[in-house]
Image (spheres, helix red, strand yellow):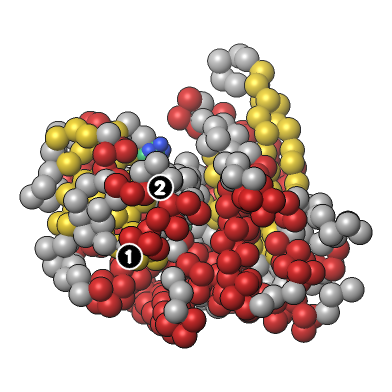
């Protein structure tokens, strides 16, 4: 086993931390716009209050364990030399190796990666899989780069972080603008340093030890969570009107599964804008069009609307499945959905969350709703470690069991404390991580 540096999570004598975790509430009080990490920690604090968690334990749990930043100079195919910034934040490993995706997007920065890494800690704890949390990213727009440049950038990033990741240390996976191909390049590059190790990443191609069902897993998990909440709210998903923002991995699979159970997908969108049809869009045709052309704008369906308009349509279920902070103080009051299912990570700011609570809109939080992806990543890792492949049926059945159990546990806690699902999910996760931390010993 690699060296366990759990106790190296540094806390300065004044209570501030290396990861800046201790300052977020003061910013909130000052009414400034919260950074993503501050926003996640505000949600943490609400749940920590419910648990009556001590101040020193709060700081220990919020503070990232390690943050790696690398500069990646690259001679691009057009002859220019461009330098990109790469990040890997390892948030917590009390419950197991750290786990989280890798994002390629121009808005990637250290604070966002920190926020996403901490969300992974709480997410893996909510679904009770033996992992901690991490996240990584490169600040770049892969759509502007030649595919060979994306490969070179991935290899350079992998070689720079190779000593910090590992099948029992930190296991990356796909996220925005990364996919099975990117994971395959990581497997190959990592092998140059440590030998062939398929368990170093999840979300791999099947040919390299990927799991059946992994690509669809986040969307499938979202379906299971939506079915549970819809039943509680008396929403019949057959005929229910659904709007989905983002039509990548998460959005398109979610639309597919909800369409399959009879929901009317009245609007979908991608970075180029949204399309709307009150009678319901032909989701299989849209998925085919996007697989062929890459963008929804190539599909001739519905009327064009903006991404902002999609969020406030008169629907039963709204699924933000693109980027963070899209539901905020300025539009939360206009949202007409009864149920918001967070496919994306942190799509709802704390202000919008408060508005939804007061307006009686139910939100299935990211750390529960979109946990299907990391759950099947865990199944993939287990298969890699055992050199044994599960059937697709087994993966889907185990996913349903895990998602349903997590939803029921969160709902029970929410009912017990008369609180919302997000606060309950954070409380459940914090309790589990705190217990593991204290049992292992903080020195
Ligand atoms: P993806 O790259 O496959 O798809 C992203 C989609 O969002 C694309 O359709 C893109 O066009 C669209 N998009 C980008 N910018 C947009 C904008 N400004 N407005 C509207 N749409 C925009 O990424 P993904 O893997 O589907 O991830 C989407 C979200 O789900 C992210 O927040 C990610 O962290 C989260 N998530 C992903 C997984 C996973 O397994 N891939 C798991 C859990 C959570």
Residue 181 seen in this snapshot: no
Is 114 located above or below residue 45 in the figure?
above
Q: Earlier in the sequence, mark 1 or mark 2?
A: 2
In the rendering, at what x and y percent does residue 381 appear? 57, 68
What residue is at 67 percent from the left and 54 percent from the top? 25
How many numbered marks appear? 2
- Name the residue carrying label 2: 327
- Which quadrant holds the N terminus? bottom right
Residue 310 seen in this snapshot: yes
Is 67 left or right of 274, judged from the image as shown?
right
From mark 1 to mark 2, how far is it between C-alphas? Answer: 16 Å
What residue is at 56 percent from the left and 61 percent from the top? 43
Q: Secondary structure at mark 1?
A: loop
> Which of the 4 image quadrants contains residue 132?
bottom right
What residue is at 74 percent from the left and 41 percent from the top? 69
Frontmost residue, 407 versus 34: 34
Is 256 left or right of 368, judged from the image as shown?
left
Extreme-left residue of the structure: 279
Q: Which mark is residue 360?
A: 1
In the rendering, at what x and y percent does residue 349 appear? 48, 50
């Amino acid at each position: 086993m690699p060296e366990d540096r759990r106790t190296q999570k540094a806390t300065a004598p004044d209570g501030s931390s290396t990861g800046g975790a201790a300052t977020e509430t003061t910013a909130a009080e000052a009414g400034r716009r919260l950074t993503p990490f501050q926003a996640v920690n505000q949600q943490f604090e609400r749940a920590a209050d419910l648990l009556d968690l001590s101040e020193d334990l709060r700081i220990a749990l919020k503070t990232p364990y390690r943050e790696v930043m690398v500069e990646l100079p690259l001679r691009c195919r057009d002859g220019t030399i461009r330098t990109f910034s790469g990040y890997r934040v390892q948030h917590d490993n009390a419950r197991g190796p750290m786990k989280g995706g890798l994002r390629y997007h121009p808005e990637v920065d250290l604070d966002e990666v920190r926020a996403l890494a901490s969300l992974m800690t709480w997410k893996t704890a909510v679904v009770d899989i033996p992992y901690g949390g991490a996240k990584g990213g490169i600040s770049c727009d892969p759509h502007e780069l030649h595919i060979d440049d994306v490969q070179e950038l991935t290899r350079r990033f992998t070689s720079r972080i190779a000593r910090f990741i590992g099948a029992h240390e930190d296991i990356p996976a796909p996220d925005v603008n990364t996919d099975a191909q990117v994971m395959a390049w990581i497997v190959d590059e990592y092998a140059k340093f440590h030998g062939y190790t398929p368990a170093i990443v999840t979300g791999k191609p099947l040919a390299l030890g990927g799991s059946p069902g992994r690509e669809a897993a986040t969307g499938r998990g979202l379906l299971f969570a939506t079915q549970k909440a819809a039943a509680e709210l008396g929403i019949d998903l057959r005929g229910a009107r659904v709007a989905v923002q983002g039509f990548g991995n998460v959005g398109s699979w979610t639309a597919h599964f909800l369409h399959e159970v009879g929901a009317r997908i009245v609007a979908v969108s991608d970075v180029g804008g949204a399309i709307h049809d009150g009678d319901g869009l032909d989701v299989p045709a849209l998925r085919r069009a996007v697989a062929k052309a890459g963008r929804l704008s190539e599909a001739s369906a519905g009327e064009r609307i903006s991404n902002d308009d999609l969020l406030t349509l008169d629907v039963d279920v709204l699924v933000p499945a693109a980027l963070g902070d899209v539901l905020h103080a300025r539009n939360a009051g206009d949202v007409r959905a009864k149920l918001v299912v967070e496919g994306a990570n942190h799509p709802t700011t704390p202000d919008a969350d408060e508005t939804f609570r007061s307006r009686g809109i139910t939100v299935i939080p990211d750390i529960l709703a979109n946990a299907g992806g990391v759950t099947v990543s865990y199944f993939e890792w287990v298969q890699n470690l055992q050199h044994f492949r599960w059937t697709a049926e087994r993966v889907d059945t185990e996913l349903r069991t895990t998602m349903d159990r997590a939803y029921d546990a969160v709902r029970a806690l929410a009912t017990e404390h008369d609180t919302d699902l997000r606060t309950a999910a954070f409380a459940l996760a914090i309790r589990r991580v705190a217990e593991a931390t204290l049992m292992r010993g903080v020195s």
